[in-house]
């Protein structure tokens, strides 16, 4: 029932939400999160804004790992629909990275499952971010302890 | 346990891939290499590139046959073993 | 900075999200919640599905009350954008009722502020829902203790 | 305090509006009506319709001049006082 995509191209948030809700009258709440490339300072070079982000992944494992995370969400909440789209490859500041959207009879399930999915995607799916700096150098983003803490709440 | 040789597919991601210099290799470790942890130690001894990749051992994570695995996971012939840093997607 | 609308017509979730993020490179996460009319059983007539929902409000007060709630969210989180659209009037099952969307540098602020806004909208903005039953009868929806509890968490 | 008469605008919403039969009325309560709570008691004594609206007093909420208010809120001439059930939007 869940829609899981790993792709290089962008996604259309409005279209994905429309697909989740089309023709249904049993949904009471829809939660959605979009992760976007922020033109941040590089982790190890605070004076230089990043030029791009490259997302590497483990192709043979990624969709399966996301599927496990979605199954866990479906075990915990009564979901009427779930869409996870994660981009890979090179992305510029302002571009979408990831979409999580869930539909449920009640708002709390939609909100909680959305937060759960993005927290777990950050810590339990095989993606690695590399920041591209102005001079062509690059730096792999380090995992943050607070992401592990966020995922461990669930 | 029988001391069979184990032809394994080993994958590297992110900075482990950069340090080793390849994303995938097929290797047959000696029979005494039974677990993921033992494989990492053996790989680190192969050459300077592998040594560099596995230097920071506590930041290396692994998967066996596309499932996250512990260092104590016992390997079987034909397994696909991946080494990578902690994930940073989302 | 926040966009607050109280209107009878529907809204376009994708278009609203696009407006929030257009041309920006400082957003890291966007949270969104859409409340939808669920074809539920009436509260006091569990054997009869509701035909429609009518949202009454206090026109002179509504936008101001929502403004206060948004100001509180902006005090608590670093938001780069916030949109709240609440419909009033008669709506059929499957139709959108309310949209909350927030943009922030980091995901936790976007997720938390979205949940905060919808929880507070449910308990601190002057809207009243009336369910329309098949025989033309109607019943005002009663406030739920769990909504007060959800709002009080914040 | 001076016992001035208070022409007030009183609004009703949801089932209070249905029971009273009007959504808005302008009323001048007697000088002893100083607070929202006293206004509600006085309104409830006006006729059967108002009595029905204020019967379930603990489920009645109020706003004064478009701000949520307590029953103890003191009223001033010209105030807009709204009575309604607990809100159910969102």
Image: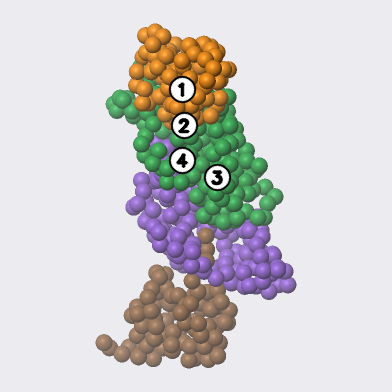
Chain colours: A green, B orange, C purple, D brown
**Local SS, label 4:** helix
Looking at marks 3 and 4 on the same chain, the residue that comes earlier in the sequence is marked by: 3
Residue D71 shows up from this direction? yes
Q: Residue A93 at what x, y percent from top left?
A: 44, 30
Label located before the other in sequence (2 or 1)? 1
The answer to whether C130 is drawn above or below residue A146 in the figure is: below
Residue under disc 2 on the same chain as residue under disc 1: yes
Q: Secondary structure at mark 3?
A: helix
Q: Which quarter of the figure has residue A52?
A: top left
The Cα–Cα distance between marks 2 and 4, rounded to whole angstroms, is: 10 Å
Label 1 residue SS: helix
Q: Residue A73 has which mark?
A: 3
Residue C121 screen position, x and y as percent: 47, 60
- Disc 1 and disc 4 on one polypeptide chain: no
Location of the C terminus of chain C (image quadrant): bottom left
Q: Please determine whether, in this image, residue A83 is positioned above or below residue D25.
A: above
Please give the name of the residue rendered at 42% of the width and 22% of the height, measured from the top-left corner: B37
């Amino acid at each position: 029932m869940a829609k899981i995509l790993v792709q290089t191209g962008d996604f259309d948030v409005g279209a994905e939400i429309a697909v989740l809700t089309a023709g249904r009258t049993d949904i009471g709440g829809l939660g959605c999160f979009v992760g976007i490339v922020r033109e941040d300072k590089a982790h190890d070079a605070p004076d230089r804004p990043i030029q791009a982000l490259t997302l590497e992944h483990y192709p043979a494992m990624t969709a399966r790992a996301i599927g496990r995370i979605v199954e866990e969400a479906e075990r915990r909440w009564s979901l009427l629909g779930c869409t996870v789209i994660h981009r890979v490859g090179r992305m510029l500041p302002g571009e979408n990275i990831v979409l999580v959207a869930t539909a449920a009879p009640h708002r709390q399930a939609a909100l909680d499952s959305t937060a759960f999915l993005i927290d777990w995607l950050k810590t339990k799916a095989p993606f690695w971010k590399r920041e591209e700096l102005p001079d062509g150098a690059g730096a792999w983003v380090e995992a943050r302890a607070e992401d592990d803490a966020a995922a461990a709440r669930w | 346990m029988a001391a069979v040789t184990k032809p394994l597919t080993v994958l590297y991601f992110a900075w482990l891939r950069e340090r080793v210099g390849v994303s995938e290799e097929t290797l047959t470790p000696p029979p005494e290499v039974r677990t993921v942890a033992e494989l990492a130690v053996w790989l680190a001894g192969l050459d300077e590139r592998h040594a560099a990749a596995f230097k920071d051992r506590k930041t290396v994570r692994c998967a066996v046959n596309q499932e996250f695995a512990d260092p104590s996971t016992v390997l079987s012939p034909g397994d696909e073993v991946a080494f990578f840093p902690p994930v940073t997607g989302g």
